[in-house]
Structures are given as C-alpha cells and as structure tokens.
Amino acid sequence: MRASATACSNIAFIKYWGKRDFDWNLPLNDSISMNLSAAVTTTTVEWDPALRQDEIYLEGERVLDDRGLRVSRYLDRIRADWYRMYARVASVNSFPAGTGIASSASGFAALASAALGAFGEDLPSEVEMTRWARRGSGSACRSIQGGFVEWTAGDDDESSFSQQFCPPDHWDLTDLVVLVSRSPKAISSSQGHRIASGHPFMAERQKLLPARILALKGALAQRDFQVFGEIVEHEAMEVQGIMLSGEPSALYLQPGTVSLLHAVRSWREEDGLPVYFTLDAGPNVHILCESKDAPELRRRIDKLAPRAEILENRAGPGARLHDDHLF
C-alpha cells in the first residue's frame, strides 16, 4: 500500500489571504494562480498496519515537531473516511520550504495524491481531489490541476474547490523567482491568515475583488500582458499592505526584496521592458514576463543580485502519481 506523487507549488495572481473557516481552510475570497514548474514536491506514502504511529520524514530527516503533527492530523482526516492504519511518509522539495514559495501547496497536493493513491483504488474525481488537498492547506487545492487555476471560495467544504481556468500551454509566461532569502519566515502563513482575517481593511477588499477577478480572467484569456501585469502587481501590493498593517505586523519584505521591486518598475517604466512582479507571504520576488523576455531579465537580475538563486518557472502540470518512490 505505497504510492508516490509529485505536485507543483503555485503563485496566486489574485491572493488567498484570510479565512472564513480555519478547520476546513475555507478562504474569504476566490483566487487565481499559476502552477510553478520548477518548484515541486515529491512525496511517498506507505500505509503499514504494523506501525503504531505515523513516521514522517522531510528532506531525509524524521520530524517529530509541529510539521510532523500537521501531517499526522491531515492523515487522520483520511483515516476517518478510508482505512484506520498509520503511514510512513517521506517528502522532498526542489526549493526551500517556509520562505514564501507556497511549499504547503505542493506539499499537501502531493501528500493527498500519494496517500489516497496508496490504497490501490481509483482516486476520487479531480474536483474532489482539490477538496482533499485544501483540507491540508488551502492553496494546495490549486496545485491538483495544471496550468492556470481558479479556486472558488464557497461557503462550506462541498462548495470550496478549484478548477483549471487555462491549460499550461495557453500562455508562455515565465515566473522568475528570485530567492532573496532561504530562511524560514518569522510569521507563518497560518498565523498571517489569522491576523488578516480580523483586519479592518478586509471587508473593503472583498467588495473590490469580484471586478478585479473578472478583469484578470479576461486578461488571462486574451493573453493581454499589460492588463494582466497591472492587476497582479497592484494585488500583490494591496495584500502586502494588509500584512504590514496587521497586529502584529507581518514584515516579510527585506532590503533585497525592495531593491528588486524598484528595479522591476525601473526596467518597465524607464527602459520599456514588459515586466511585472508579485509577492507571496515571504521575502522572495516573483518576476513575471513573457518567456521571450526571460533571458534579458535574467541578465539584469544577475547584474543586480549576482549571488541570488533564481527558479525559472513556466506554467506547470497538475499533481501526478508515479513509481519513483523515495523509499
């Protein structure tokens, strides 16, 4: 009873920040994202009736802290509906976890796929798999399907799920993730959601989002990069404003982050290069462009931050099962 799965992380163009239900990970609003082809998690799950507790291994080391507890609590949900036995879980990332590249999205999408796939039965429908992934981490539901994905917030477990909006080959976009820092952030995304949910700006944000989402979907469908970029960059700064003004304040931006944001705007406004940025809950910067402009942007990033690691992403595939097991 063993299976392995790989899933991409994703970057939200319209952000998921703030929850209406923390147990079921129901968001305050719909969101839209792109899977990241170079930011992937691979997970192997083996259900073993001889085990007396779950064994969780992350990056080759057994974990007995809150990370392992979170995985075990998620497996409890599966045990409640499927088979009551413990599991051995191993997981590795191609990118640093806890730094604002949505490692929990790829992590729980891969975990859900491998854990259910290990039963040797047909997986639930793709939409139902997005619900299973969401129960572990909200943004994980957007990593089940490939390409550009829309998550419908819903108002209960049944109505909150994601669907593919456009396939990976719809638009040749590149997301250059510049790793400003590999250090775990001081305020986790889980904490950040709790802070944001009670923020006085959130009610007004919810009024503005339906029109913004509609405009972004139109720009994506028509591959209008200027409209797309303007919406995405504004959205990133709006959510950062909520993070910065929360109680406590989530100050994810670092000097290297701010330097890159200024550089992107200079390259666009002064040099005419079509490029925009977005941010997640962390210091690392997502620099968005059409793929034909990626080589020039990489040259400029290397000049500005010569020692920075860059993850070059296209629109990635959905979660998939495979036989390349970690143990």
Image (spheres, helix red, strand yellow):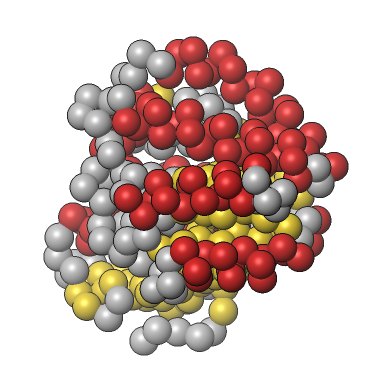
Q: Residue at x 32, y 50 (%)?
A: 255
Q: Is residue 300 left or right of residue 274?
A: left
Q: Nearer the viewer, residue 287 or 94?
A: 287
Q: Residue at x 59, y 17 (%)?
A: 208
Q: Nearer the viewer, residue 11 or 60?
A: 11
Q: Give the quarter of the figure containing the N terminus.
A: bottom left
Residue at the outermost right position: 222
Q: Is residue 259 left or right of residue 31?
A: left
Residue at the outermost left position: 64
Task: Name the quadrant containing residue 298.
Answer: bottom right
Q: Residue at x 48, y 47 (%)?
A: 261
Q: Position of residue 280 (x, y in %)?
A: 44, 46
Q: Position of residue 183 (x, y in %)?
A: 26, 61
Q: Is residue 50 left or right of residue 26?
A: left
311 w.r.t. 69: above or below: below
Q: Give the quarter of the figure containing the C terminus.
A: bottom left
288 w.r.t. 304: above or below: above
